[in-house]
Amino acid sequence: MTYTKPKERPTIETERLILRPFCLTDAPAVQKLAGDIEIARNTNAIPHPYEDGMAEEWIGTHQAKFEEGKLVNFANVLRETGQLIGAIGLVVAIEDDRAELGYWVGKPYWNSGYCTEAARAVLDYGFNVMGLNLINAHHMSRNATSGKVMQKIGMKHIATLPQWIKKWGEFVDLELCVIMKSDFKR
Ligand SMILES: CC(C)(COP(=O)(O)OP(=O)(O)OC[C@H]1O[C@@H](n2cnc3c(N)ncnc32)[C@H](O)[C@@H]1OP(=O)(O)O)[C@@H](O)C(=O)NCCC(=O)NCCS
């Protein structure tokens, strides 16, 4: 099995969550949750301050990147209430049947297992529906919480990448983690 782009942007249901495509009406919630400095501090691409219009612009990029086969991402919403709590996605290296997992969960929803639950479902989808061979992820060395999520979903720590990125003017070490399809257990 090799990587096959899904025909449509997927929706996945888990015990407590629905992972579905973002829509423009999610923008205010994205701005509020991703606008928390704790989200920007631990991620590479999320701007701070998170200004008006940025969420709409970001959401507006998803469909084209999906059609190119390069991105599958999901709004992470609570099944019971429909409340948006975060984002999770796969950036695909098409030629290599490989993707990079990325995620954030809004601070009011931390430490309830939501990221772990979403990430397991996305790995399952990536390996068993998209046909990926390997999924990698990285977290800042100081971000032990994200490291814990990667460990819980069965990723293996591969390397420390010293001073890999420059965040707000300071070099930051990253930890690289991977999981192969053959090692993934639902
Ligand atoms: C990382 C993040 C997505 C985790 O989301 P979450 O829904 O709270 O994650 P979960 O509840 O599934 O798992 C968190 C785990 O980390 C543990 N944890 C919390 N704080 C911790 C710390 N300081 N050190 C180590 N582990 C910690 C929790 O106890 C939990 O493990 P457990 O279930 O075994 O108790 C969220 O904190 C976040 O969005 N942070 C800011 C953005 C970010 O870091 N994105 C990821 C970039 S790589």
Image (cartoon, helix red, strand yellow):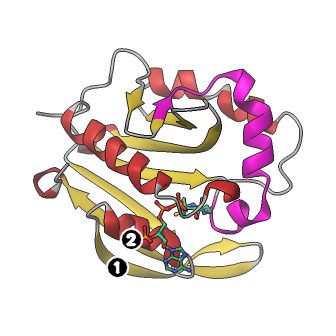
* Residue located 60% across and 29% down the image: 82
The answer to whether mark 2 and mark 1 are in CB contact below 8 A is yes
Q: Is residue 132 left or right of residue 78?
A: left
**Above-or-below relation of 95 to 24:** below
Residue 140 is at least partly visible in this image: no
- Residue 114 in the image: above or below residue 76: below
The amino acid on which the numbered mark 2 sits, given as a three-letter code, is Leu
Please tell me which residue is depicted at 47% across the width and 26% down the height of the picture.
Answer: 66
Find disc 2 in the rendering and name its residue.
176
Residue span colored magenta: 18-44
Q: Nearer the viewer, residue 29 or 183?
A: 29
* Residue 122 percent location from the top left of the image: 36, 42
Of callouts 2 and 1, the N-terminal one: 1
Residue 12 in the magenta stretch? The answer is no
Residue at 49% across, 68% down? 146
Where is residue 181? Give x, y as percent. 16, 50
Residue 94, by quadrant, is top left
Is 50 in front, or is 81? 81
Q: Quadrant of residue 58?
A: top right
| SS for callout 1 | strand
* 95 relative to 67, above or below: below
What is the quadrant of the N terminus in the image?
top left
Q: Residue farthest to the front? A: 80
Task: Name the residue type under label 1.
Answer: Ala
Q: Position of residue 159 (x, y in %)?
A: 34, 79
Left or right: 144 in relation to 58: left
Q: Is mark 1 within 8 Å of ligand 1?
A: no
Q: Residues within 10 Å of mark 1 (few under 14, many from 20)?
A: few
- Give me the disc on residue 159: 1
